[in-house]
Image: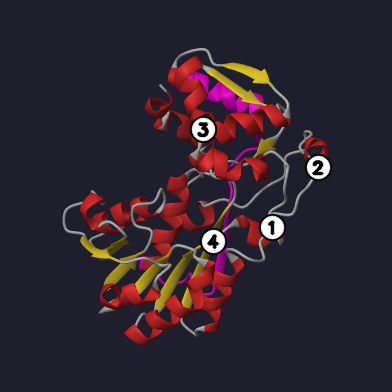
């Protein structure tokens, strides 16, 4: 049995590859740049791009199961190619925003394409990635030991990427998960100030929190580039999930403290407690130094 991992050099895909290799599976990793993949020994690296379905023909040859990174524009064509190649099971990296109904045009169409194919499917729907904090705050923490953010009371159930990969790997390898959509959150609701404190504890140095306006934070993130620049408007309340313009003052009210509720985690699938934000911060302490 050969398992194709798309998005194999991504933050979750790379972990899925590692875990499949440790489980003794035959793994083929799809990447646009095989020469730079740096994947474990024994992994077959295949060139391909999900935005160009015609490039996937060789990579899909002989594949039985597939981990699918979400690209909505080509999802139906990619899934159709996979089905014709003999793929029987697809595990989708989706989003908790599908569960809540916010996502109707990015992850949801991928899920729908897979379900319509008649193949075995499992959707993995993570909530907010803890990694967001590294991508947003990493530069200022490394340079100045400071976090600048407009919403000190904004809180989330931050999800460790390893929990996401664990669930995806189990769904690829084991039966009993077909036709299931797993929403994954972190085990505790943590606000911005506490997140900063936890990172500081992991790093072993004081990190100052500075409250700034939403406009100032957007300017900072845009200058950083990358993930921060691409997502600044949404994360700071200037636009909604679909890109419609919104008022950040409304977002401020939405992000006032709320009572914690029990959220779904990886534990029912993995049999282990979900990783905490403190564990994530320790795992990434060197990235903040």
**Residue 258 in view (yes/no):** no
Contact, CB < 8 Å: mark 1 with mark 3?
A: no
Q: Is residue 179 left or right of residue 151?
A: left
Point out the tag, 1 or 3, that comes first from the N-terminus: 3
Q: Residues within 10 Å of mark 1 (few under 14, many from 20)?
A: few
Q: Which mark is residue 242?
A: 1
Across and down, in percent, residue 175 comes to: 41, 72
Q: Residues within 10 Å of mark 2 (few under 14, many from 20)?
A: few
- How far is mark 1 from mark 4, CA to CA? 16 Å
User: What's the residue at 46%, 49% (across, down)?
Assistant: 163
| Residue 97 magenta-highlighted | no
Q: Quadrant of residue 213?
A: top right
Q: Secondary structure at mark 1?
A: loop
Q: Secondary structure at mark 2?
A: loop
User: What's the residue at 50%, 84% (across, down)?
Assistant: 117
Q: Secondary structure at mark 3?
A: helix
Of badges 1 and 4, the one in the foreground is 1
Q: Nearer the viewer, residue 107 or 123?
A: 107
Point out the tag, 2 or 1, that comes first from the N-terminus: 1
The residue that disc 4 covers is 94
The residue that disc 2 covers is 247
- The magenta stretch is 173-202
User: What's the residue at 35%, 50% (across, down)?
Assistant: 15
- How far is mark 2 from mark 4, CA to CA? 27 Å
- How far is mark 3 from mark 2, CA to CA? 23 Å
Contact, CB < 8 Å: mark 2 with mark 4?
A: no
User: What's the residue at 55%, 38% (across, down)?
Assistant: 228
Q: Residues within 10 Å of mark 3 (few under 14, many from 20)?
A: some
Across and down, in percent, residue 97 comes to: 65, 57
User: The N terminus is located in which quarter?
Assistant: bottom left
């Amino acid at each position: 049995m050969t398992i194709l991992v798309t998005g194999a050099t991504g933050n979750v895909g790379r972990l899925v590859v590692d875990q499949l290799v440790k489980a003794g599976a035959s793994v083929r990793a799809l990447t646009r740049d095989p020469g730079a993949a740096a994947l474990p020994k024994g992994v077959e690296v295949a060139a391909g791009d999900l935005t160009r379905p015609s490039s996937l023909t060789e990579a899909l040859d002989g594949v039985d199961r597939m981990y699918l990174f979400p690209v909505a524009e080509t999802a139906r064509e990619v899934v159709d190619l996979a089905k014709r190649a003999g793929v029987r099971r697809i595990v989708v990296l989706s989003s908790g925003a599908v569960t809540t109904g916010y996502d109707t045009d990015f992850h949801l169409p991928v899920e729908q394409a897979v379900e319509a194919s008649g193949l075995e499917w499992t959707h993995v729907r993570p909530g907010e990635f803890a990694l967001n904090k590294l991508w947003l705050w990493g530069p200022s923490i490394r340079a100045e030991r400071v976090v600048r953010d407009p919403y000190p009371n904004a809180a989330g159930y931050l999800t460790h990427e390893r929990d996401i990969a664990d669930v995806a790997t189990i769904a690829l390898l084991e039966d009993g998960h077909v036709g299931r959509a797993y929403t994954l959150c972190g085990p505790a609701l943590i606000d911005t100030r506490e997140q900063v404190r936890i990172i500081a504890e992991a790093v072993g140095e004081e990190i100052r929190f500075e409250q700034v306006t939403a406009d100032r934070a957007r300017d900072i993130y845009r200058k950083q580039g990358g993930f921060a620049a691409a997502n600044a408007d949404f994360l700071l309340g200037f636009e909604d999930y679909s890109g419609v313009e919104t008022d950040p003052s409304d977002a401020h009210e939405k992000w006032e403290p709320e009572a914690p509720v029990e959220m779904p985690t990886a534990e029912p699938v993995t049999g282990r407690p979900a990783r905490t934000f403190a564990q994530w911060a320790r795992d990434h302490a060197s990235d903040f130094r």
